[in-house]
Image: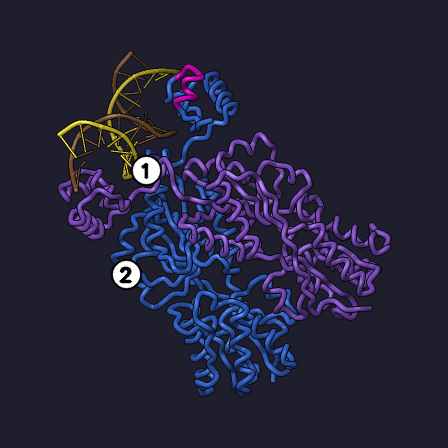
Chain colours: A purple, B blue, C yellow, D brown
Amino acid sequence: MDTITIKDVAKICGVGVSTVSRAINNKPGINEETKNKILGVIKENNYIPNNSARNLKRSETNNIAVLVKGINNLFFSPVITELEREIEKKKYTFILQHVDENQDEIEVAIELEKEKRLKGIVFLGGYFSHPKDKLEKLTVPFVLSTVGMTDNMKNMEYSSVAVDDVKESYKVVDYLCKLGHNKIAVLSAICDESIGKLRFEGYKKALSDNNIEFNEKLVYYLQSGNDRYSIQSGYNAMKRLLEEKADCTAIFASTDLIAIGACRAILENGYNIPDDYSVAGYDGLELSRFITPSLTTIRQPVENIAKETIRILFDAIDNNEGSVHKVFAGELIVGESTRKI
Amino acid sequence: MDTITIKDVAKICGVGVSTVSRAINNKPGINEETKNKILGVIKENNYIPNNSARNLKRSETNNIAVLVKGINNLFFSPVITELEREIEKKKYTFILQHVDENQDEIEVAIELEKEKRLKGIVFLGGYFSHPKDKLEKLTVPFVLSTVGMTDNMKNMEYSSVAVDDVKESYKVVDYLCKLGHNKIAVLSAICDESIGKLRFEGYKKALSDNNIEFNEKLVYYLQSGNDRYSIQSGYNAMKRLLEEKADCTAIFASTDLIAIGACRAILENGYNIPDDYSVAGYDGLELSRFITPSLTTIRQPVENIAKETIRILFDAIDNNEGSVHKVFAGELIVGESTRKI
DNA sequence: TTGTAGGCGTTATCAA
DNA sequence: TTGATAACGCCTACAA
C-alpha cells in the first residue's frame, strides 16, 4: 500500500489536481458540491498532503519557529507554552525546534527558514554571540527571548526581550546584604559567556555597593560541560565549599536548580537553612515554591516576556518595524531559604 | 538577496548540477579537485540545500523521529538524551518532534513519516490507545517507549518497551505496607486511561495482598486537565486530604512531582515527613534525590529503556523482526520520606 | 568523470 | 468553475 498522492485523489474523483488542491486548501472558486465530494474521497482514502512538497512549492507560509537551546531547561517550559498560545492566537503555525547544546542555532535557523519558509523566528536560550555576517543570512525577522543580554547586543539590528541579568542578580544579592550578610559565596559557571558571567557581575556589583570586599575565595565554580547547570552540579560545588569550610553565611546560586543542589549538600552535612546558611537562587521556577525550604529567588515574568516577544516579532513581520530591546524587571521572591542575621 | 540554489552553484562553478549534488552528498565518482572547488564556492556563497526539496526527492533517508507527548514532563528529558545518543551512534538522524497534549500523536506521525521519509518512529508518553486501522497507516516500524502499557497492547502488532506500572506501583505500596502502614492514601488522576489507572491498580493489589481493605475515602483525585500531573496539582490534592483530616499515615503519589507537591502541603501545615506522614512517589527523577526529605520512589531504568527501544526499532528496520514487548523492572529507591511505624 | 533530463508531490498561472 | 501545465529545488538514471 504505497502512499497516495494528490494525483490519485484527482483520478478517483475524476477531476483535475488543481481542483483537489483548491478543496484541500479551502481556496475560493470551487463548487461546494465537488469540494465535498473530494473531501469525502480524501477522508476515505486517508490522503495526507506531503509537507515537503507543499513547503517546496508554496511561496509563503504562516510558520513561526521557536528554537530552543537545551532541552532540559525547566525554565523554558512555561515560556514555550505561552509562546505557542500567542502564535496560535495570531493564526500562525507554531513550530518547535530543539537545538542541541553543541549545535549552532543560527545554522539550524537558516536551514529551517528555507525548509519551512518561515515568517519569523524566536530564539530561546543559548549564548547568543554570533558574528554579524552570519546573522545576516537570516532573512526573516527574529527575536531573542530570555537570553542573557550582553552589552554589544544592545546595538545590534535584531530585537530582544529579556530581563537584565546583572540588575536582577544584583537585586537578590543586595537583598542578602541588606539582611546583614557580608560573607556571601557564589556558585557560578566558569567559561560561560552569557548568564553565568552576567549574574556574576551583578553579584560583584551588589557587594561593592554594600561596601563588602569581593573575596575570590568565595567564588565556587560549577563543573564545566553541558550539565553545568544541573542539580548535581550545584550539589558538587556546594560540597566543595563545605569541605573547604569556606567562611560564609549566605550562598548565591546562579540558577534555582543549582540552589536546590546546594541546599541538599548543606542539609546533608547537618547544617540548617537558613540558620547556618542562607541560600538564594535565580529563575523563579514553579518548583522553587514547593520545595522545603522554599527558595528565595528572582522570578522572571514569563508570560510578559512571551507576549512581548510575539508582539515585537509581528511588528517586524507586519509593519517592518526595526529592532527593539525590551527589558523586563524580575521580581524578588522571598522564600524560606534566607534569613536576617 | 534571493536564496541561492544548486543551479546557481552549478553555474558559478561552470559545472552541471549533478556534479554539485555529488559534491554535497559525498558521492563517489567525482574528481577531488572539482569537488573541492565546488565545496569552496558553496561555502563562499552560503549555499544551503533546501531540505524540503531533498526530502521530496529522496526515496530513502536515515531519519528516525522521536515523538514526545507533553513537553513539561521532566521524566522524559534523560530518556530523550539517551535515545538521541543511540540513534546517532547508528549514524541515523535524530528528529525530535513534540506533540501537543491535545494533538493526536498518530496523525502527527503519519504526516511526519511522509514529510521526512522516516525510517522509524519512537513514541514517548501519551496514552496509547489507538484503533488498529489507524495504526496501520504507519508504514514504518515504530516502538512505544515508557508508555503505560494496557493489557490489550500486549497482542498488538507493534513493539513496546516499558516498565510494568502495575507491578512497580505494587512494589512501592507493598513496601509501605511492610513498613507497617495500613492506612495508605493515594493521589491519583481521574479519567486517565494509562499510567494513572495502572498505578492505581497496583496500589489496590498491594493493599489486598497485605490484607488491607481498600478504602474509597483514601483515594484523592488530582484535578483534571493537562496540568493534572503538575506539582501544584499534587499540592492541591494533598491539601484537600489534610483539610478533610483523612485518616492515614502514608501517601502514595502517582508521580514524583505529585509527591513533591504533596510534601509541601504536609510540611506547610506543620506536619512532619516521615513522622506524621510517609510519602512515596513514582518515576525516580534526579530531582527526587535532592529535595529534602528525599523521596522514596520507583526509579525507571531510563538508560536501558532507551537502549532497548532503539535496539528493537533497528531490529524491525534492518531485519524485519516482528513485534516485541519488553518489560523492565523498576528499582525501589528508599528515601527519607518514608518510615516504619 | 561529467552533464542532461525527468520526476518527487504540490501549488499557481493560465486558458478553457 | 475547472483542468493542463509550469514551476519549486533537488537527486539520479542515463548518456556522453
Q: Chain of mark 2?
A: B
Element under disc 2 = loop
Mark 1 or 2: the one toward you: 1
Left or right position of B120 against A157: left
On screen, A78 above or below A57?
Answer: below
Q: Main secondary structure of the magenta part?
A: helix
Task: Look at the numbered discs 1 and 2 and tell me whether their residues touch, using CB distance below 8 Å.
Answer: no
Q: Position of residue B334 (x, y in %)?
A: 59, 71
Residue at x 81% of width, y 54% of height = A207
On screen, B232 above or below A70?
Answer: below
Asked whether residue A264 appears in the rendered view, the answer is no
Q: Position of residue A12 (x, y in %)?
A: 15, 44
Which residue matches tag 1? A53
Determine which quarter of the picture holds residue B118. Answer: top left
Asked whether residue A143 appears in the rendered view, the answer is yes
Q: Position of residue B219 (x, y in %)?
A: 46, 81
Most foreground residue, A187 or A146? A146
Element under disc 1 = helix
Q: Is residue A283 magenta?
A: no
Identify the magenta region.
B7-15
Which amino acid type is marked by label 2? Pro
Q: Residues within 10 Å of mark 1 (few under 14, many from 20)?
A: some
Q: Chain of mark 1?
A: A
- In whole angstroms, how far apart are the C-alphas of marks 1 and 2? 29 Å
Q: How many marks?
A: 2
Determine which quarter of the picture holds residue B150. Answer: bottom left
Which amino acid type is marked by label 1? Ala
Which residue matches tag 2? B131
Q: Is residue B8 magenta?
A: yes
Residue at x 37% of width, y 22% of height = B18
Q: Position of residue B113 (x, y in %)?
A: 34, 46
